[in-house]
Amino acid sequence: MTTDLTPAWSDYAKDVLERLNETWHIHSWERPRSEAFAAPVVLPEVAPSALQKKRGAECPLGAAALDELALPPVPPHVIQLCLRLAAHFGTADGFQQCLRPGQITLISGIAQDQLSFVRELICVGFAPENLRIGFAPRHHAECDVMVLSPEDGLTSSAAASFHRRISAALGHSQPLILLCTDETEPAAELSRYLPPVTRLTPLNREVLFELLRITWPNGAAGLVKIADQFPDDHQLAALPLPALQIALRANSALEVAETLRNFLAGTEVKKGPQLSDIHGGGPALEAAKRIVADLQSWRDGSLPWTEMSRSLLLHGRPGTGKTWLARAMGNTPGIGFVAASFADWQARGHLGDMLKAMQASFSEARRLTPAILFIDEIDAVGARGSRDHNADYRHQVVNGFLQAMDGIAREEGVVVVGACNDPSRIDPAVLRAGRFDLKAEVKLPDHDAIHGILTAHLGQILRQSEISELARAAIGSTAAEIDAAIRRAKAEARARGTDVQLAELRTLLVGDMSVSPELDHRLAVHECGHAIVGHELDFTILRTVLTHDGGATEHTVPTNAGRLQDIEAEIVMCMAGRAAEQMVFGDVSSGSGGPERSDLARATSLAVAIDTRLGLGVFGPIWTDTSLDAAMRDPDARQRVRLRLEAAEQHAIRILQTNRPHFDAMVAALAQDRDLAGDTLQTWLDNWKPPSPSSAPAPAPAPAPAPAPAPAPAPAETRPISDSAHPSQLSDCEVSNAP
């Protein structure tokens, strides 16, 4: 139970409010922008209203009036701003520090519609008498201190004008007080040289109770008894101003508490997924749980903000549950959640409106701290390297987003979570550490995860044996596909007035096609070829799975120096699925080909890059910006690539032939279980007999002679291949697609 509700800054606030009461007039706040300086205007004191007298006489919280302090004739929302400023400065000496010669004070976290009130409160209530205050750099000669704030809303032009006025004011010696919203904080190129940003004290219990003492001057003793019935500091900080204004219209402090609790009751119940509802494992889920746990620890004061990971990028194929996972993070009790996307921001209108909407989302997240700001489809930010007719627009969008990210990174309490399908489309500056600390792929759900989803939705309808059967059949489906199938099955059952039918749900999960053992066998051959060859070439194999439209083998590329043999090993890995089909069936399917990230596409790109971009081919240390299409139109280049890929395929076959019985057994296991991962997969790989005499890629046959080729130099041993020149390292975990 709280026993002392009087804050240390209470006496300072009383002094400020007394000054404000003596000088206050509502129309004095509508000053022309061209006015050079502000000086207090002494106005007659306004007597307490009838409502104030009633509150003083009938308030049930106590009998003693506040020491000769009647309610100022000022709106309550201005009083609470005054109290927040008093809490921010602490004492008159604290404000006096802002007036030292050359001092720069930057106060952020002020709502746009409250900027003018804060500025006038500083002038009328906090500044010493006869202090000349200027509002523009051109008035520096006739003022003692300058107070600058943005004008004309949150437009990009207003922010640019504000920053220009700051730069101009820095050229003069007067103390400078900068008041800004979260959206108009100085840009990174300026803020790095300014003192740290201080945020205006938010509405909290101390401020609210002090406000109630003024509004209900007899209520100090009674507030102690009902203090625990008020929302906590986090809830009050997130409270919109209209909600506070309505609550303060109540007839007693107890009614104020009840009104605020009623307002918050509807917002505290968070519907939707919880992290505890998501089954299975994987780096994305583990990262999400760790960040949420750390954010809760920071909120409780047991973990410094500097020790946390403060941003997370979730990436993966469509439908894998990236948005679902982010919303589950935001549904954690006690953590605010703001959802946004570039599509939503761009829908607001032209570039200025788009950037304004972006900043508003970041500002809302700050208001709800501790909070998670979720930005969906973040790859829509684009990159600044392209030169099409939209390049200027994209450049400004990327710069605006970088500024917003840098601004939020300088503060505490907000974790940014982004989601996208293809991180390679994002500007590298967005992806660097400090803007996105962690990057995790959200993969297809494994058997345990699918079993958990089905149990959560159908556990009261189906037997566990039926759920296990469905989970195995659904391997390879995305979380979105499983969720859609369940909802449709329930809708069909409601329409019939029956329970969900197992056969119908299975059809919705796996499609109308009957399972083909022959196709599953070919898919398993293909994926086991990737897994075994990759393992022998020191790739880390994470998972191999059959899907309804093919298969996938998830792996990470080993750290290497980017030598010719390292690049050729990756080509062998890409060709291993096709090689396995050739070994087993005597023919190949089209499964290695297809989109630009298919096995053949990646193998071809690497083979071309050896000659054109990596300086490891027949032309020696020459780099050319030759596109893949242009390179393949050269008959000699095309022949060199073909010979290199065929040699890689033959080398993969030699590895697989080393222990054919083990390979066949692993294929049968994958065709049966449809998913090999974790300890089960590792056992199959560890029991593979190493090939003899060596698993190093065989050199490609001598290519057709090129016109006047330069002698090939010895490959560099110490210079690593860069990401841009090394396509296979553009993501943390590569996935090869079978037919």
Image (spheres, helix red, strand yellow):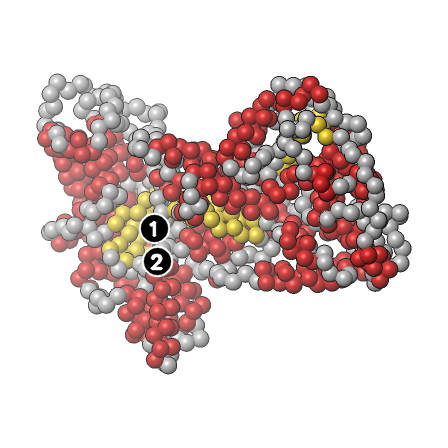
Q: Residue at x 70, y 48 (%)?
A: 77
Query: Which residue was labeled with disc 2?
Result: 478
Q: Residues within 10 Å of mark 1 (few under 14, many from 20)?
A: some
Query: Residue 527 appears at what percent x and percent y?
Result: 25, 52
Which residue is at the far bottom?
497
Do labels 1 and 2 touch, CB within 8 Å? yes
Q: Nearer the viewer, residue 336 or 600?
A: 336
Q: Tag on residue 18?
A: none
What residue is drawn where x is 76% and y is 35%? 124
Spot occupied by residue 420 in the image (x, y as percentages of width and height) = 39, 46
Whether 190 is drawn above or below 599: the answer is: above
- Front in this rendered view, residue 243 or 625: 243
| Residue placed under numbered mark 1 in the picture | 317
The amino acid type, in three-letter code, at marker 2 is Thr
Answer left or right for 39 relative to 155.
Answer: right
Q: Residue at x 28, y 52 (%)?
A: 552
Specify the quadrant of the image occupied by residue 546. bottom left
Q: Is residue 568 visible?
A: no
In this view, 398 is above or below 288:
above
What is the crowding at mark 2: few (fewer than 14 residues within 10 Å), some, or many (at least 20)? Answer: many
Label 1 element class: loop
User: Disc 1 residue type?
Assistant: Arg
Badge count: 2
Q: Real-space Cα distance between discs 1 and 2?
A: 9 Å
Above/below status of 16 relative to 188: below
Q: Is residue 206 left or right of residue 53?
A: left
Q: Residue at x 19, y 56 (%)?
A: 522
